[in-house]
Amino acid sequence: MALEEKREKRPPVTPMMIEEEAALRNGSRGLTPGPWAEAAGPRPRTTERHIAVHKRLVLGFAVSILALLAVTMIAVLLSVRFEECGAAADGPRRASGNGSLSGAARQPPGAGQPPGQPEEEARGGEAAEEEEEEEEEEWQRRQELPPWARPRLPRHLRPLHYNLMLSAFMENFTFSGEVNVQLEVLNASRYIVLHAHRMHIEAVRVAEDKLAGGVRVARTFFYPQTQVFVVVLNRSLEVQRSYNLKIIYNALIENELLGFFRSSYVLHGERRFLAVTQFSPTHARKAFPCFDEPIYKATFKISIRHQATYLSLSNMPVETSVFEEDGWVTDHFSQTPLMSTYYLAWAVCNFTYRETVTKSGVVVRLYARPDAIRRGSGDYALNITRSLIEFYEDYFKVPYSLPKLDLLAVPKHPYAAMENWGLSVFVEQRILLDPSISSILYLLDVTMVIVHELCHQWFGDLVTPVWWEDVWLKEGFAHYFEFVGTDYLYPGWNMGAALIRMLANFMGHSVFQMGLQDYLTIHKYGNAARNDLWNTLSKALKRVGKSVNIQEVMDQWTLQMGYPVITVLGNETTDNIIVISQERFVYDSDAKPKDPSRGDNSYLWQIPLTIAVGNTSHISSEAIIWVSNKSEHHRIPAFEEAGWLLGNINQTGYFRVNYDIRNWRLLINQLTRNHEVISVSNRAGLIDDAFNLARAGYLPQNIPLEIIRYLSEEKDFLPWHAASRALYPLDKLLDRTENYNIFNEYILRQVASMYLKLGWPMNNLNKSLVQASYQHEELRREVIMLACSFGNKHCHQQAATLISDWISSNRNRIPLNVRDIVYCTGVSLMDEDVWEFIWMKFHSTTAVSEKKILLEALTCSDDRNLLNRLLNLSLNSEVVLDQDAIDVIIHVARNPHGRDLAWKFFREKWKILNARYGEALFMNSKLVSGVTEFLNTEGELRELKNFIKSYEGGAAVSFSRAVETVEANVRWQRLYKEELFHWLRKSLTH
């Protein structure tokens, strides 16, 4: 769930979300890409590898939630990819009689029939089809959609309990199932409408609970447009009665990334297979017929039959295992608490595990490939999981609700991880860690993903959003606690976050914590909407004597697109008076608002603006001003004529701050003379705001470049990190221009002195990843990355020497924390033999962290033939895992030598790519964004628009956003490129 830049959020019908994803989910994890979301720093000619954001700035929170919301809402409302069921192709097959039905859905190709359940001939025919057509015409005459054609399930039934029995046939990748659903009737109806997709229904029976007699089934059919299965009864079900729906079915264990799918790995030269589920947001319906909406919480009793050479896992512990003489075993799992379908889970694999136990008795196990468990690659994740469960139990004052938590590391997964209750699934790269070859950066990435997913065991699993429009109730808090939880584990790392942090800051952290405890206690095992949270937090404030309508404040932040930019102007005619205005921040002011009826002028937020004044030696304590109008005048008593103003103190607010040029000049002078008067987080915030404001046209292009001149004296990591990732999109706008070398030279001048001061790390393979000198080592890494990226000769020579030593000695002595930089630089500078060497190492290593950076290094080549070769190899799942292929294409697109190649490859292979990732909308969105985000010429914009006109398939929202991004890039080139180069030429001559 699953990795960020602030971007426009969704239309106002749904609340703000981020990441994957990023999260990312990216993801993060889910966690999503963006111009400065995925990359920690610019690597124009060499290091194109995405750097996970480990010291995330305040303003880095928004994009992940945005992407995940977009993904989730599209998946729900557009019903993702509609593959035509056999029933739709041949006409719905129906049966009349006492409730049995055969052949109602397509038989999956190659699906084996379990013994004793032969497929029967379908009954029904033209008469039944005519009856259905007449019924649909009747609904049309009533000017109503039939219940099966509506975007959400009808509300006349509620599932209370599922008894689900599965048999997994790993030899031919099929499975059979029998589901018994106990239904409560809320309103009388003769229709049972539930979700089912891409499965073959063998039989259906409806019976009144605890009574022998069945309810006669008139007919059944699939309705592919909404992915539902409809059972039409001969009579209506009676209100306040309970019925049992029994469906027998079978389906494929798909070779894809959603539903119940298969994956594989190689151990001792033998390929082994596993099968695992990914149901969020709308894919449980591929694994069993169900009411696949989060509001329909029920209890589940699951049994899984499999060959004894495998083991099975699910949300709950195994209660009993029944062994059969033919080498099969059936695992019966304990009944779950009330839960939604999207975080139900199971897996069939032959993994091994390690185990630990929390203070409260929760059994924590990490399951992975036997060789990874043997090497101890899961030990770090296992140990911090135990600590984090104990932390969350103490913070929330709500115990972890299940007797166990399994962490499952799988080779293939659409997200960084998925928070299934009691069985969290992680892609190997985000949970396995080898201390002998993993960097601090990689450790931090693993840490934050685990912190995020464990938070979901409370926010998401225990308390679930009513509907996907409130998905940020789980994702927003999981992102916030990424930083809170990481600070708990590593207090010296000083993490920070955004929107939720702003809320916690103006409420007071202890009151905020008390409100969250109340919210979880009140709504546990149930569903909640945003107003439930706002009301609970408002009550918490009242208990300490404060009266703030949290709903009124926060609805503006969660229901409107984007976020604001505050502009603070000094008043030249009146002493101590400032003018504060707000507007929606956009990168392209020419872009039309998504809701033309509103326009940008109608966007208003209630903004808790913290503000301080300072001079060359001192900064005042902060004051808070609530800004709620388009423009306001405020008196600042301590504002001296020679002093400067600073807004959004310590970056606790979820907005940008702009100033008049005079104030920017004063701040630049302060940074140059004595930067430590301004806090580290504010120094980072000034850099981040200035670059993004200039990119959007709110500031002259020279202001951010003047700000970073002080960095030669900056010894803290965070401002360097802010500069690095703020320079990244600017670099991508310029890296194919004729005068790029001018920009390149300017950045090198700012980096040179600090690069010489810090030098290169020693080759200390001391097995210790978390060092007291974390900040220093990360600062050194950031500076080396910039130096190598922009062509520092010494940096290039050092990288080439380290690569050559590795090749000649076959011993990798490259320091762990800069390996990715060295690999990428070496591939870029050196000959094809180095590329082939890295390619060979990619295939031979079994360490997932090393495999990741080796693959990304291959995309750094200047050789277009090698880049084309890699692009074509990326579609071979035996060579590059499905989720990694997207990263290959995106990283080639970030390479100025490969951008046009990746864009061409994307268009030519769109049908293949869309078939592979179309339903995994987060991945599709990530791919579209990653390939197009740095296109910046009029010709490329035309190509994009022409492609959109002609392409087939989904991702319409992603392409619409891509057009906005490229239009903004083209606009910047037209309006500001020459202004920037003009200033750079003058600056370099002085």
Image (cartoon, rainbow, N blue to C red):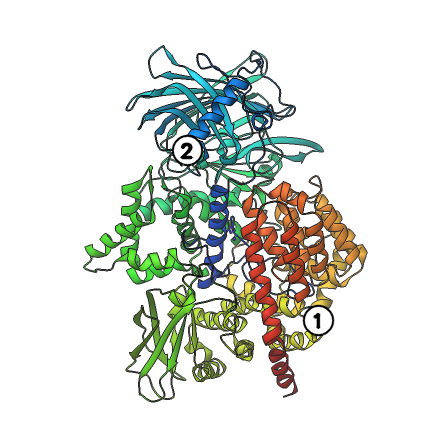
Where residue 577 appears, x then y in whole percent? Answer: 31, 83
Give the labeled residue for mark 2. Answer: 141
In the displayed structure, would residue 729 be above or below residue 428?
A: below
Q: Nearer the viewer, residue 242 or 344?
A: 242
Where residue 483 appears, x then y in whole percent? Answer: 43, 55
Mark 1 lies on a secondary structure that is helix
User: Which picture quadrant has residue 833?
Assistant: bottom right
Where residue 984 appears, x then y in whole percent? Answer: 62, 81
Q: Nearer the viewer, residue 921 or 121?
A: 121
* Viewer-nearest of discs 1 and 2: 2
Q: Nearer the viewer, residue 775 or 744?
A: 744
* Amino acid on which the number 1 mark rests in the picture: His
- The reply to whether residue 217 is visible in this rendering is yes
Where residue 57 appears, x then y in whole percent? Answer: 47, 63
Q: Of the two numbered discs 1 and 2 on the same chain, state the one appearing first in sequence.
A: 2
Mark 2 lies on a secondary structure that is helix
Give the labeled residue for mark 1. Answer: 794
User: Which picture quadrant has residue 564?
Assistant: bottom left
Mark 1–mark 2 Cα distance, whole angstroms, equals: 78 Å
- The reply to whether residue 853 is visible in this rendering is no
What is the total number of numbered labels drawn onto the structure image? 2
Mark 1–mark 2 contact, CB under 8 Å? no
x 61%, y 68%: residue: 970
x 66%, y 66%: residue: 938
